[in-house]
Image (cartoon, rainbow, N blue to C red):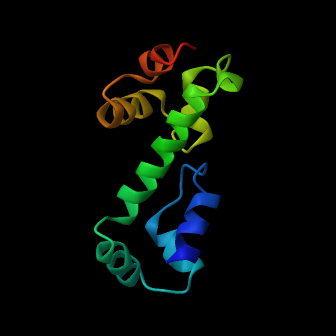
Amino acid sequence: MLQITAFIEAHLGEADLSPAQIAAAHHISLRQLHKLFHADGTTVAGWTRQRRLEHCGHDLRDPRWAARPVAAVGARWGYPDPAHFSRLFKASFGLSPRDYRASHGL
């Protein structure tokens, strides 16, 4: 599981990262991959989404990224569609990415 999560972390910026790609990279079936995450109480997609959004939140709070557009932050972590990124971020953090950044003084 540590190798799998490390692989996902290393590829979070790839918008096309999929459970099938992750399973293939580790020479396990897609079903086995889902079982591993289910045993931890989550899903592959859910864990990946959570990690991506956590990284986005970090970047939106980071003064070094303050000049970058919100859409660039989302794209950096695998969300090339700004509207989709904004919806997911708001559902997770309760604020739009722009408002979240502003709430942290940036």
Residue, x 55% and y 45% (percent of image)? Answer: 78
Residue that lies at the very extreme toward the right in this rendered image: 64
Q: Nearer the viewer, residue 35 or 79?
A: 35
Side of 83 relative to 3 (left or right): left
Indicate the quadrant containing the C terminus: top left, top right, bottom left or bottom right: top right
Q: Say which quarter of the image contains residue 6.
A: bottom right
Instruction: Confirm whether residue 57 shows in the render.
Output: yes
Q: Nearer the viewer, residue 30 or 68?
A: 68
Side of 53 relative to 68 (left or right): left
Q: How many marks?
A: 0
Q: Is residue 36 above or below residue 57?
A: below
**Location of residue 27 in the rendering, given as x and y in whole percent from the top left corner:** 55, 86
Instruction: Confirm whether residue 80 shows in the render.
Output: no
Q: Is residue 44 above or below residue 82?
A: below
**Location of residue 54 in the rendering, given as x and y in whole percent from the top left corner:** 48, 43
Residue, x 30% and y 77% (percent of image)? Answer: 39
**Location of residue 52 in the rendering, given as x and y in whole percent from the top left corner:** 50, 47
Q: Is residue 105 above or below residue 79?
A: above
Residue, x 48% and y 33% (percent of image)? Answer: 81
Q: Nearer the viewer, residue 99 or 15?
A: 99
Residue, x 36% and y 36% (percent of image)? Answer: 88
**Location of residue 21 in the rendering, given as x and y in whole percent from the top left corner:** 53, 70
Side of 91 relative to 97 (left or right): left
